[in-house]
Image (tube, rainbow, N blue to C red):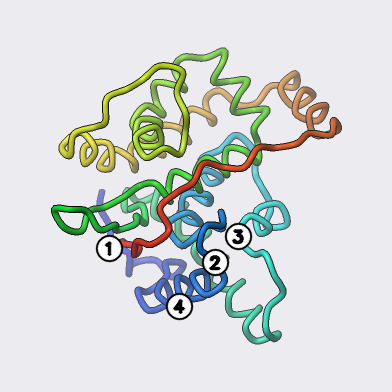
Amino acid sequence: MSTSKTDWPSSLTDEELDELDRYLRVHALEGDERLLLDGVHGLLSALAVGPLQVLPDEWLPEVLHEPFADEAEGNRVLELLAKLNDSISAELDVDAYEPILGEIDTASGPALSAAGWCEGFSRGIDLRAALWEGRLADDPQLIELLGPVMALAVDDGVLSAEAEFEKLSDDEYDDCLAQIPAVLDAVGQYWQTKPVTEGELEAMVQRHSDPEVHEGSAPRHRSGHWVH
């Protein structure tokens, strides 16, 4: 079933997406690792289909890095972020999910880029890293399900790979992009049918109790425009 994004109240309008995009760009510095709109969408998408709920208190620091100018601005930005977050599950439920992608300039003209979305998705996984990493190491099914997203992330330099891979052709890249909604649906179903075990929860708690230093994320395209 395919449903227009105007058929549920939680979806942001194009004007609201533009408003949120402008706020994130104004507060992003060239060369830093702050997420833009495509990255925020990737982050929230990973949380929507992940193994355990992640509350706003945990994910907002990945998006917001400085105080708001005033209470009105704060309330508006938080409202837009909450609406964006809610819209993802709503869109997945009605088979109407579309990733927000970047648009970069190439020698042959503008091209879609999943670099920002994949960067955000990887940060969403990082918020429950112990659960994702443990399951990815033990269950090849999850790796297979994530294949198209992992291929995009490696191709765009968001993830590193032990072996060298040839760059995806334009057709292969577009095919992986087209598979993102199906990947999210399959991963969400995976965690529902194979929920987190008590042992995995204990390992996660233990990991969080140990002081760790996390490496910075790989550089990503920051000059492109978002496309939805």
The x, y position of residue 164, in whole percent, is: 36, 20
Q: Which residue is mark 3?
A: 63
Which one is closest to the eye, mark 2 or mark 4? Answer: 2
Question: Which amino acid type is marked by label 4?
Answer: Glu
**For the point 18% across and 34% down, which residue is it?**
169
What numbered label is drawn on residue 31? none
Q: Is residue 23 left or right of residue 154?
A: right
Give neighbour class at mark 2: few <14, some 14-19, many 20+ (Cα, 10 Å). some
Judged by depth in the image, the label closer to the viewer, 1 or 2, is 2
Say few, some or many: other residues with alpha carbon within 10 Å of mark 1 (under 14 / 14 to 19 / 20 or more).
few
Circle 3 SS class: loop
User: Which element carries disc 2, helix, strand or loop?
Assistant: loop
Cβ atoms at labels 1 and 2 below 8 Å apart: no
In the image, 31 versus 116, the foreground residue is 31
Q: Nearer the viewer, residue 200 or 136?
A: 136
Question: Where does label 1 land, which residue?
Answer: 4
